[in-house]
Each structure stands twice: as structure tokens, then as C-alpha cells.
Image (cartoon, helix red, strand yellow):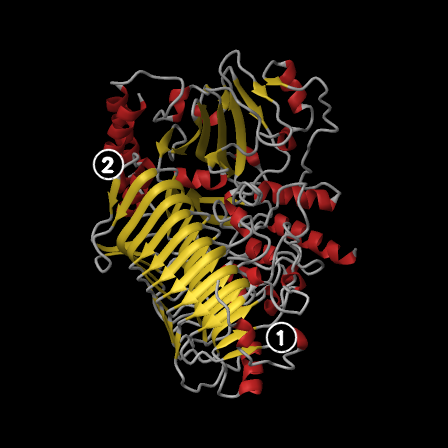
């Protein structure tokens, strides 16, 4: 079935593209059409002008691994922004590949890439595109309405996991990638990218314009998951996993719960804050965060649930994130000790 | 290049893709694709029939779109087996949207949520949870939030575990000719300005029509709300809201409740056989929730309740609720119809302890409209039934 469909789509591609000029931006049907990668596509070896990057605190996506790249048109640069996402030149593309190792304990046994998401900077703003990989790992084809992809892997404890992995539809992309109602990137911010000299290297390579007085130590930097400072790690976790919606300009601002790091008052952070429109998402608990009592905090209830009407984040998670739950529980417990 | 390409591409996709899917039905994928690819000005028609959906249908960033069903009893969108997303249908960041002529049911979260939409019509829609009302139903059936210029008319909302028709943090709203039943709150207007709620029927809910202002929200203050010519009948349903939600505190048997809102007029309604509180005017303190938001005003003021018709039936107030229990102890089966919690903001009072004109609560010309000031801040001691201080008009 998949083969037939891919074939059909390839045919469709030929028909469609025979009449249009191949442009550097705008939707192309196949991932390989862009030329972001050289050699075998599934190796994700970046071509010239495509730069890999990593973030401090990744978003949890059902334990999927991610490989991220930035494409910048030749001779262009990103502009540094201390608060939000960097400013990108028209034509830039953010490329994020989602995959699972067959066995997390032994990556050398290979992997299965499921999807590649593109965020393209166009004249009018950002646009999202979604590509789903075929079974042969030879090509990824554009998809609009999302899909459910069965996947199996062995996790870091040796447990076999079966998951109906959900690739988002294009509107769901915007469910998270939204700032004041417009499409926006999330992870390409100073606080996520500032680590191990990544920003300085880009500046040297002419890819990024840093302010003259830039000092990585004083620039925003999210903690990593294993940071010994638990408060910093927890706030970073909430920032990366919740604050794309839960910030004063995000789609979840209706709730008055803001989890962006670091500048938030205790009530907006959820401390002793009753729910507004959570419905059964409140789980009979009184407050977003009940200091000292994770099991009476709505935050934990929603992180632990696998019910689609309750769980948070709303999109992109079906499995509970054990490590995240442990971190936020411990953090809320700490609050009771102060 | 884009438009030509998009149209052609869309056409091909709709023809070819439905067979290439797992997880969603061909029809679901087709509808979702249409919503994503819709050109401004498009009419998206939903076919007749029972349409099973596995994921939220979502329209974002479009202008002047009509989502048109074949009729309330003909097009039925059902989310009984929803796998993803909380809402049934979601419309965000849009302008000029009309949703009409279909039924939508059984989503895991809200049935229709619209956020950041300017000029929006819900017309002739039934939004319901089937089966008995239960706390595992979603919170809101029709849920515009942060919208403006909203018309909700000829709609029916059933079974919401919070509010059937819930208008939150919006401006300029009409809710008319709708029916809300078997919800916790039938119709709720919250942190919303310029709302007219008229000629609706709200019955068999826990509370009929609620006008609330809540703290900690981006849109701070509602007001300029008119509730008139509604039938608010027998809202005596057990409160099945999940605990922790503010509507969970609404006593079964509430007709109209005005909580912490200013500038509200309730008139010419028929408020009939609501056993506990036919009309309650209360401050946020009655919720016993803490207030952290310093800019929040918890007191109701500038309220006018007039020319309503109350039933003179004697009814036992609900004893399942703290307030109801107090009423039972204080009034037995003769609970006054119009109740004010009596918690006063000192800034609203003049030297004689009377409300300054701009902040008055005015109650007059109601049929069977008996009154009590509950003195809730004095532990309900010294309840006053004197209506004279409230005989005023704006």
C-alpha cells in the first residue's frame, strides 16, 4: 500500500512540477528535492550551507530522537535576539528529523526515521511543511493532513515499545509554533542554543550576527535535564515543554498559566492558582502547583495522563515522560521544604 | 507560482490521498486537508451522514470561511473514538467565520473551541455529549474565547461538564435562541464585555445562566452584560463538574448567578423552579478560592435585576452544597428568589454605609421576587430581607 501511494505521489510530483519552475522556497513534494542532504538521504549528511545544531532542553516527543539543521541561503546570516527566536533571513529553513533507534542501548543497530519537519522563512513569515519517510528510508514525501505511523523500538531499559506515532497535520504545527497568532520558530533562541560555544562558532563562520558585547556566560541559557540545580532544570523543562503555549503571547494564555522561563510571578506559574477552564483536566485537584504536594498539583496530573482530553502537552505526546515527571515532582516537593 | 500549484495540488490530493492513510478515515483526511488548504472566501461543506473522526478538525489563520453542514440532524461529526487532540473542531486566528447546520458530539475535551477569531457565527449547531451527563464529559460544548463580534444562535448544547455555551474573555457577543440543557452551567459569560444573552432556554442544568469575572486572566474585566427574555427553568441538576473547577461550586438549583462582575442587567426573564438560588449576586469570596491577582476586583457592582417572573413554588434547596445547606437552615423551603451575599467593598460605600450611585445593586418590579442580603461575611448572621436599599434604577 505504502509503495503504491509513494509511487502515485511521485507520479503526481512529476505531473505537478513539470509546469512550474523549481524555486528555492515554497513547497516541494519530496524532501530530496531541496538538496539539504548529500549522499544517501537517510544518513542526513548536511550539504553545503546546512548546519547542524543542538538545544539545551529538548521538547519531549514520545522519546523520539531528533536531528536538527539550519539552512541559510548563501551569504545570509541569523540575527541574535536575547529573548525570543533569532531573526532569520528570507529563504532560511529549519529542518528537524524525528527518528527512533531500533535499540536505544545500541544505536549502531540502526534507526528508523519517521518524519522531517521544515519551517521555512518566507517573505510573509514562517511556514511549516511536513515530510513522511517511506519504509525503505529512501525518501520522505510531503503530507498535509498528518498520519499515524506504527513504530517499535527497544528503550534504554531494554523494554520493547510499540507506539502509533502521530505525525502532526500542518495546523497542529501551528498549535505550538504560534506567537501572537502568527507562525514562529521556538527552539532557535539564545536560551536554547547557547551552549558549548555553538553561538560563537556560528559567528566565526559568518552565520550569526552577535552583539559586540556578547558574553555567553551572561546570555540566557536554559539548564539541561541533568543540571544539579533542580530549580533551574525544572524551569527549563517547563519552558521547553509547556511555554510555547503557556506564555503571555501564546495560545494557552487564556488559562493565565505562564510557564516561560524565568520571568513569571508565582500565581502565573500556577502556585496556589485554581484552574480556569481545565474541566476534567483539573483532576479534582485545586491548584496548578501545590507547593510540597506534587500529587495534589494539576501540573503533574496532566503530565502523567495519557487521556487525550487531559494530557499535556495537548499535541505531540502520548507516552508519559518518566524523567520529566520525576523532575517536576521533585521540584514541587522541594517547594514545600522552603 | 503558489496559487496555481496549490489548487492543482489540492485537487490531486483530495482525489488520490484518501486511500493512502492509516489512522484517519479517508473522509476525515479529506475534511482536514480542505480546512488546511482552504482559500479565503471558501465554503467547506460537510457531507450528510455520521462522520467518525479520530483527531481535532482545525481551521487556522483563514478569512471568510463557511463550514456548512447538511443540517443539524443530517451531518453528525462524532468523536467518540477520538485518539488525538482535545477538541472536536477548533478555529483559531481567523476572521469572518460561519459554522452552521451540523451536530458535533462526544469529543474528549471541548466540542467547538474558537480562539482569536473576529466576526464569528455559530448557527443551528447541536453540540452534545451523548449518554447521561457525567464528569468525564468535556468542559465546554460551544467555547469562543478571546473572540470578538460573536453570534451564537439557534444552537443546542447538552451534557457539558462545565458550561454548555461558554463565552470567555471575549467582546461583543450575542447568544440568542439557543437551548442549553443537562450541562453544569447552561450558558456562562466570563470575563466578557458587551454580551447580550436573550431569548434562550436554559433548563435542567445545575445553573442556568452564569455571569462571572475570574482572576489571573489576560482579559481582566467583563461587564456590560444583558440577560433578558430567557426561560431559565428547573436548573436543579446534580453538579457533575470535575472537582477543582469553579462551576463545581455552583449549587444545584441556581437560576442566574452574577459573580464579581460589574454592569450586568437581568430583566424580563422567566426564572422558574430553580430550587436553591433563583438569582444570586455574589462576590468571588463565596468561592473560597484564594485571590493572588492584585488587579482583580472580586465585588459585583452596578447590577440591575428587574421585571423578571419567578415561580412562587416552595422548594427545598439543595443540601449537597454548602450554600444550599445554609439556605435550608435559614429559610427552609422558602428561600428568597433574589440573593445578595452582602460582602461589601468599602470603596463602594458612602459615609452612611450605603452604596454610592455608580455601584448600586438595583432590584425592582420582579414578580414573586423576594429578596435577602445574606451577610455572608458575618457568617450569615443578621440576614436582612429589606428590599428598600435596593430600590433604584440606573
**Quick one: label 1 or label 2, which is nearer the N terminus?**
2
Q: Chain of mark 2?
A: B
Residue B41 position within the rendered picture, expressed as x and y whole percent measured from the top left: 27, 37
Q: Quadrant of residue A155?
A: top right
In the picture, the quarter occupied by the N terminus of chain B is top left
Q: Give the labeled residue for mark 2.
A: B16
Q: Secondary structure at mark 1?
A: helix
Q: Residue at x 58, y 81 (%)?
A: B326
User: CA separation, marks 1 and 2?
Assistant: 66 Å
- B196 or B385, nearer to the observer: B385
Query: Does mark 2 fall on the same chain as mark 1?
Result: yes
Residue A114 position within the rendered picture, expressed as x and y whole percent measured from the top left: 44, 36
Question: Which label was assigned to residue B376?
Answer: 1
- Disc 2 packing (10 Å; few <14; some 14–19; many ≥20): some
- A189 or B71, nearer to the observer: B71
Q: Residue at x 75, y 43 (%)?
A: A229
Residue B248 position within the rendered picture, expressed as x and y whole percent measured from the top left: 52, 68
Amino acid at each position: 500500500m505504502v509503495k503504491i501511494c509513494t509511487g502515485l505521489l511521485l507520479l503526481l510530483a512529476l505531473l505537478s512540477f513539470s509546469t512550474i519552475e523549481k524555486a528555492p522556497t515554497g513547497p516541494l513534494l519530496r524532501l530530496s528535492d531541496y538538496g539539504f542532504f548529500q549522499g544517501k538521504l537517510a544518513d542526513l549528511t548536511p550539504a553545503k550551507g546546512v548546519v547542524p545544531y543542538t538545544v539545551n532542553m529538548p521538547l519531549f516527543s514520545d522519546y523520539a530522537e531528533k536531528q536538527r539543521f539550519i539552512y541559510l541561503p548563501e551569504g545570509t546570516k541569523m540575527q541574535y535576539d536575547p529573548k525570543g527566536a533569532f531573526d532569520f533571513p528570507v529563504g532560511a529553513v529549519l529542518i528537524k528529523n524525528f527518528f527512533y533507534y531500533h535499540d536505544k542501548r545500541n544505536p549502531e543497530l540502526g534507526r528508523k526515521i519517521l518524519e522531517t519537519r521544515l519551517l521555512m522563512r518566507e517573505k510573509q513569515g514562517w511556514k511549516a511543511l511536513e515530510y513522511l519517510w517511506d519504509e525503505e528510508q529512501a525518501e520522505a514525501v510531503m503530507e498535509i493532513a498528518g498520519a499515524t505511523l506504527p513504530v517499535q523500538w527497544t528503550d534504554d531499559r531494554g523494554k520493547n515499545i510499540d507506539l502509533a506515532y502521530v505525525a502532526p497535520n500542518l495546523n497542529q504545527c501551528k498549535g505550538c509554533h504560534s506567537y501572537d497568532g502568527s507562525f514562529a520558530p521556538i527552539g532557535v533562541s539564545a536560551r536554547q542554543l547557547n551552549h558549548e560555544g555553538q553561538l560563537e562558532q556560528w559567528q566565526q563562520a559568518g552565520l550569526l550576527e552577535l552583539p559586540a558585547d556578547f558574553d555567553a556566560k551572561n546570555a540566557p541559557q536554559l539548564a539541561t535535564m541533568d543540571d544539579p540545580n533542580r530549580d533551574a532544570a525544572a524551569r527549563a523543562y517547563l519552558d521547553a515543554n509547556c511555554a510555547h503555549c503557556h506564555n503571555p503571547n501564546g495560545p494557552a494564555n487564556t488559562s493565565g498559566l505562564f510557564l516561560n522561563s524565568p520571568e513569571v510571578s508565582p500565581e502565573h506559574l500556577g502556585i496556589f492558582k485554581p484552574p480556569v477552564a481545565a474541566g476534567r483536566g483539573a483532576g479534582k485537584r485545586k491548584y496548578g502547583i501545590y507547593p510540597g504536594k506534587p500529587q495534589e498539583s494539576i501540573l503533574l496530573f496532566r503530565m502523567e495522563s495519557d487521556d487525550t482530553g487531559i494530557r499535556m502537552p495537548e499535541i505531540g505526546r502520548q507516552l508519559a515522560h518518566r524523567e520529566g515527571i520525576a523532575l517536576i515532582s521533585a521540584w514541587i516537593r522541594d517547594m514545600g521544604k522552603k | 507560482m503558489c496559487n496555481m500549484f496549490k489548487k492543482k495540488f489540492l485537487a490531486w490530493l483530495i482525489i488520490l490521498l484518501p486511500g493512502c492513510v492509516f489512522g484517519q478515515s479517508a473522509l476525515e483526511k479529506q475534511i482536514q486537508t480542505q480546512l488546511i488548504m482552504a482559500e479565503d472566501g471558501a465554503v467547506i461543506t460537510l457531507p450528510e451522514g455520521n462522520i467518525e473522526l479520530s483527531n481535532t478538525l482545525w481551521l487556522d489563520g483563514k478569512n471568510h470561511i463557511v463550514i456548512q453542514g447538511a443540517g443539524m440532524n443530517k451531518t453528525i461529526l462524532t468523536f467518540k473514538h477520538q485518539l488525538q487532540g482535545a477538541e472536536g473542531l477548533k478555529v483559531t486566528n481567523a476572521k469572518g467565520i460561519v459554522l452552521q447546520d451540523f451536530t458535533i458530539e462526544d469529543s474528549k475535551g471541548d466540542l467547538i473551541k474558537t480562539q482569536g477569531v473576529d466576526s464569528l457565527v455559530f448557527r443551528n449547531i447541536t453540540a452534545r455529549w451523548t449518554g447521561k451527563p457525567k464528569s468525564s464529559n468535556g468542559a465546554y460544548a460551544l467555547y469562543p474565547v478571546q473572540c470578538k463580534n460573536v453570534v451564537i444562535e439557534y444552537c443546542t448544547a447538552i451534557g457539558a461538564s462545565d458550561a454548555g455555551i461558554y463565552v470567555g474573555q471575549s467582546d461583543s457577543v450575542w447568544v440568542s435562541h439557543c437551548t442549553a440543557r443537562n450541562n453544569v452551567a447552561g450558558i456562562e459569560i466570563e470575563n466578557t464585555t458587551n454580551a447580550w444573552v436573550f431569548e434562550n432556554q436554559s433548563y435542567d442544568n445545575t445553573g442556568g445562566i452564569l455571569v462571572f469575572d475570574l482572576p489571573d486572566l489576560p482579559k481582566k474585566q467583563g461587564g456590560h452584560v444583558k440577560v433578558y427574555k430567557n426561560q431559565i427553568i428547573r436548573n436543579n441538576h446534580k453538579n457533575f463538574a470535575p472537582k477543582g473547577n469553579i462551576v463545581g461550586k455552583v449549587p444545584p438549583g441556581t437560576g442566574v448567578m452574577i459573580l464579581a462582575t460589574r454592569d450586568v442587567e437581568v430583566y424580563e426573564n422567566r426564572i422558574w423552579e430553580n430550587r436553591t438560588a433563583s438569582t444570586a449576586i455574589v462576590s468571588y469570596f463565596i468561592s473560597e478560592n484564594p485571590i493572588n491577582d492584585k488587579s482583580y476586583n472580586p465585588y459585583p457592582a452596578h447590577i440591575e435585576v428587574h421585571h423578571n417572573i419567578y415561580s412562587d413554588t416552595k422548594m427545598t434547596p439543595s443540601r449537597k452544597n454548602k450554600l444550599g445547606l445554609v439556605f435550608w437552615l435559614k429559610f427552609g423551603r422558602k428561600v428568597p428568589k433574589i440573593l445578595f451575599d452582602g460582602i461589601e467593598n468599602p470603596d463602594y460605600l458612602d459615609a452612611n454605609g450605603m452604596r454610592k450611585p455608580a455601584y448600586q445593586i438595583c432590584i425592582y418590579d420582579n414578580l414573586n421576587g423576594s429578596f435577602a442580603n445574606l451577610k455572608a461575611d458575618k457568617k450569615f448572621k443578621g440576614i436582612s430581607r429589606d428590599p428598600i436599599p435596593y430600590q433604584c434604577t440606573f
